[in-house]
Image (cartoon, rainbow, N blue to C red):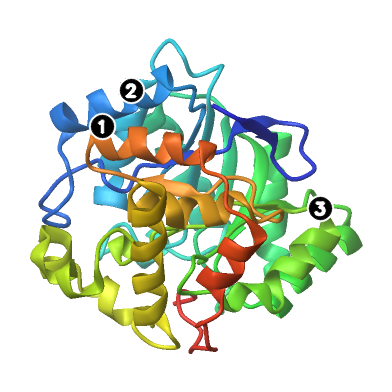
Amino acid sequence: MEYTTLGDTGVEVSRICLGCMSFGSSDWREWILDEEESLPIIERAIDLGINFFDTANMYSGGESERILGTALEGRRDESVIATKCYFQMDEDDPNSGGLSRKAIEQELDNSRDRLGVDTIDLYQIHRWDDDTPIETTMRALNDAIRREKVRYLGASSMWAYQFADALHTSDRLGLDRFVTMQNHYNLVYREEEREMHPLCDREGIGVVPWSPLARGYLTRPHEEIDATLRGETEEHMYEHPYREGGGAEINERVQELAAEKGVTMAQIALAWLFHKDWVDAPIVGTTSVEHLEDAVEALDIDLSSGDMAYLEEPYEPVRVSGHE
């Protein structure tokens, strides 16, 4: 395993962050693994040197956090645990979502209980809340750090001007600021390179992209996607513009390069991210130990500047996706 410093925090994290959305309950989404199937994958991740884990309160209604907490029992101090809040947890309680002080404080405590920790290493806002002033949100998050319930603050997909506003607000009010950005970024969705990544680079923000394999679109030939359970049932895959803006040709070039190097398509797509200086640790979700091991092996794949250019050349601008 390789390690890197997460932004300007000084915290050392594995170059792969294990995304835990896959762990929870198939009642939430059909392809999700239950606890019995999830624990061996988390165990193997630890064996492979992964110390960075990302989940969210809304994944399987909190079950993902509970499973992760169980898996890390006795090893939480050497782990870097990240979770998120924003999406409404109880359809009968409008205050179980959003980024008001009430929502943040109650959902933070619920997440701590499920994870079995007093302090969450990285607490992230899952999306931007148009209904709550950013000053209110940042004050509540700052208080969470003062109360030692959270160590660092992170944000997720939003417009670069919103993130800049949040950083400026923290600086203006003397509050702890966001230190990470978890954004939508992969070979077939690169819109973040225009504004968000340069902003993060300038501000010393750690970048931990979600969906590095484009919800599976970069793991197999595009014509075979629908043959998988996730492809058949995951409507979110079709909400993103992966098939637009040169996506199909990029998919084919990933196939070609993978065959040339004797590796998998997923490994090529991940290796491309590992070669991007502004990426600290892509968030890799998996439903099998084999795919997890493949992801770790991708750290050893060397892509030349010509390989990188060949993979990137077909890309065309696409509609912004992932902020909703």
Q: Position of residue 318 (x, y in %)?
A: 49, 88
10 Å crowding of disc 2: few (<14), some (14-19), many (20+): some
Q: How many marks?
A: 3
Q: Are marks 1 and 2 in contact (CB under 8 Å)?
A: yes
Query: How far is the residue under mark 2 from the one under mark 3?
Result: 31 Å
Q: Amino acid at mark 3?
A: Gly
- Which of the pair 45/78 is nearer the observer? 45
Q: Amino acid at mark 1?
A: Val
Q: Please, what secondary structure does the residue beneath circle 3 have?
A: loop
Note whether 254 is above or below 189 in the view shown. above
Residue that extends furthest to the top in the rendered view of this protein? 74
Q: Residue at x 55, y 78 (%)?
A: 131
Q: Amino acid at mark 2?
A: Arg
10 Å crowding of disc 1: few (<14), some (14-19), many (20+): some
- Drawn side of residue 193 relative to residue 241, left or right: right
Q: Is residue 304 visible?
A: yes
Q: Please, what secondary structure does the residue beneath circle 2 have?
A: helix
Q: Position of residue 116 (x, y in %)?
A: 41, 24
